[in-house]
Image: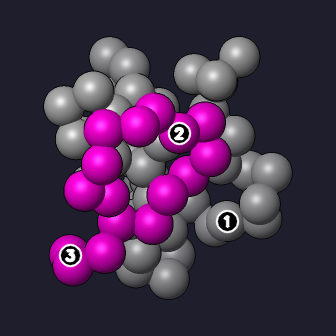
């Protein structure tokens, strides 16, 4: 399903996870943040409101 986290499939090195009710974010070894899941309230940090089953890089942090 679209809400199933799939961080590992891209070979991303996750060092920390933060889980919300309908979205999740990961801090990567590179220092980047990637989020996926519901985006109804802009919680993925990409400036939009469209849900994403794939991790999206959060810029500006």
Is 37 on the left or on the right of 19, as rendered? right
Q: Is 60 situated above or below 21?
A: below
Residue linked to disc 3: 61
Q: Where is residue 33 in the image (x, y as percent from the top left)?
A: 39, 65
Number of residue marks: 3
Is 10 on the left or on the right of 49, as rendered? right
Residue linked to disc 1: 12
Q: Where is residue 32 in the image (x, y as percent from the top left)?
A: 41, 75
Residue linked to disc 2: 52
Q: Quadrant of the C terminus?
A: bottom left
Q: Residue at x 64, y 23 (%)?
A: 2
Is 41 on the left or on the right of 51, as rendered? left
Q: In which quarter of the image is the N terminus?
A: top right
Q: Where is residue 31 in the image (x, y as percent from the top left)?
A: 40, 79
Residues marked 1 and 2 touching at CB (< 8 Å): no
Q: Is 60 situated above or below 58?
A: below
Q: Earlier in the sequence, mark 2 or mark 3?
A: 2
Is 35 on the left or on the right of 46, as rendered? right
Residues marked 2 and 3 touching at CB (< 8 Å): no
Q: Residue at x 25, y 56 (%)?
A: 47
Q: Earlier in the sequence, mark 1 or mark 2?
A: 1
Q: Is 8 situated above or below 18?
A: below
Pointer 2 local density, CA inside 10 Å: few below 14, some 14–19, many at least 20: some
Q: How far apart are marks 2 and 3 (CA)?
A: 20 Å
Quadrant of the image occupied by residue 51: top left
């Amino acid at each position: 399903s679209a809400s199933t986290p799939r961080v590992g499939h891209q070979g991303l090195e996750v060092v920390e996870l933060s889980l919300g009710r309908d979205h999740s974010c990961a801090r990567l070894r590179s220092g980047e943040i990637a989020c996926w899941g519901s985006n109804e309230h802009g919680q993925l940090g990409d400036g939009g409101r469209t849900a994403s089953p794939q991790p999206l890089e959060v810029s500006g942090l």
